[in-house]
Image (cartoon, rainbow, N blue to C red):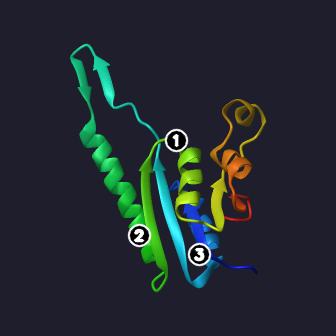
Amino acid sequence: MPQFDRVLIPLDFSELSDTVLEYGVDLTREGGTTILMHVLEPLPLHVESTFGSFVNTEGLARIRENARKLLEEAAARYPGRQFIKDLVEGKAAHHVLDAAKRHRAQLIVMGTHGRGGLEHLFLGSVAARVVRKAQCPVLTVRKTEDRK
């Protein structure tokens, strides 16, 4: 099986993330670098109510800190491996493609939830956008009934 020196693994922390992480680490050459990333999608921070309006910066800080912790825990499962952890905020596909360029990734390994039909047609998917626009190979990992 081919191995790569720089593998980017975007994690969404779904139940598929463990499998995606395993594939990505296995495809990273010994002594290579695995880039773990999570993209915090934009959340409504400004809330209007009958009691006035407020910005929930405390909630966002907790979400950001939890994501950092989950990236650290993912890396800790593979002692002796070299990781870069990248936490960004914005649109996932855009930031995955940007990280691949920035980190000079030779491979992107990411999950796809296998949604199709009208939902995919109208909404698209992060994985589909990355596959179409990435300048390096992309391995998509899909949850199947056999893999839990």
Residue under circle 3? 25
Across and down, in percent, residue 38 comes to 48, 55
Instruction: Tell me what residue is drawn at x 26 percent, y 30 percent.
Output: 55
Across and down, in percent, residue 53 comes to 25, 20
Disc nearest the viewer among 1 and 2 = 1
CA gap, disc 3 and disc 1 = 25 Å
Across and down, in percent, residue 50 comes to 25, 13
Residue type, label 2: Glu
Residue under circle 1? 91
- Relative horizontal placement of residue 108, taking residue 71 as reference (left or right): right
CA gap, disc 2 and disc 3 = 14 Å
Residue under circle 2? 73
Residue 70, can we see it? yes
Q: Secondary structure at mark 3?
A: helix
Instruction: Tell me what residue is drawn at x 66 percent, y 42 percent.
Output: 125
Instruction: Tell me what residue is drawn at x 24 percent, y 42 percent.
Output: 58
Whether 110 is drawn above or below 4: the answer is above
Quadrant of the rendering where the N terminus is positioned: bottom right
Whether 27 is drawn above or below 144: the answer is below
- Relative horizontal placement of residue 124, taking residue 13 as reference (left or right): right
Quadrant of the rendering where the C terminus is positioned: bottom right
Disc nearest the viewer among 3 and 1 = 1
